[in-house]
Amino acid sequence: MKVPNNVSPSIVTRNMSDFAQETGNVYESIAIISKRANQLSVKLKEELNGKLAEFATTVDNLEEVFENREQIEISKHYERLPKPTNLAIEEFLEGKVYFRTPEVDNDGNLLANE
């Protein structure tokens, strides 16, 4: 997964009104960001597990120590990456997140897409 360089790995103070510009509702924006952060988290976890699985071995020997070092380096790399929440916030604020609101009738029932 390619991580943009402009995303800070640490906590940044945000203006909540920036979130409401896209949807008109801060809470709706937060829900969208939350869902995107979950998607990113799953993707990063699958990627990390795939890379760590390359070094998995069932044999205990001296080479295992070197393999563990490689696993540790890969894990440290992923720990230094920005958190999925920060990535999702940046994507949302830059307009890179696609979302849609389902249409509801006057009774609050979802309308079928045609």
Image (cartoon, helix red, strand yellow):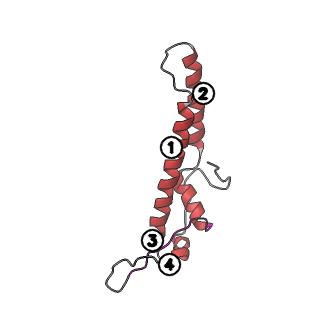
Badge 1 crowding class, 10 Å Cα cut-off, few under 14, some 14 to 19, many 20 or more, is few
Instruction: Give the Cα separation between the discs numbered 4 and 3.
Output: 8 Å
Where does the magenta region start and end?
A: 94-104
Image vertical order of residue 36 relative to residue 21, above or below: above
Q: Earlier in the sequence, mark 1 or mark 2?
A: 1
Give the farthest residue toward the top. Answer: 62
The secondary element bearing badge 3 is classed as helix
**Residue located beneath label 3 in the image:** 28
> Which quarter of the picture shows residue 108?
bottom left
**Residue located beneath label 2 in the image:** 70
Q: Earlier in the sequence, mark 2 or mark 3?
A: 3
Badge 2 crowding class, 10 Å Cα cut-off, few under 14, some 14 to 19, many 20 or more, is some
Looking at the picture, how far across and down is residue 43, in whole percent? 53, 48
Looking at the picture, how far across and down is residue 95, in whole percent? 61, 68
Q: Earlier in the sequence, mark 3 or mark 1?
A: 3
Image vertical order of residue 61 relative to residue 55, above or below: above
Residue at (49, 15) in percent of width and height:
60
The amino acid marked with disc number 4 is Gly
The amino acid marked with disc number 3 is Glu
Marker disc for residue 24: 4
Q: Earlier in the sequence, mark 2 or mark 4?
A: 4
Marker disc for residue 45: 1
Taken as a whole, is the magenta stretch helix, strand or loop? loop
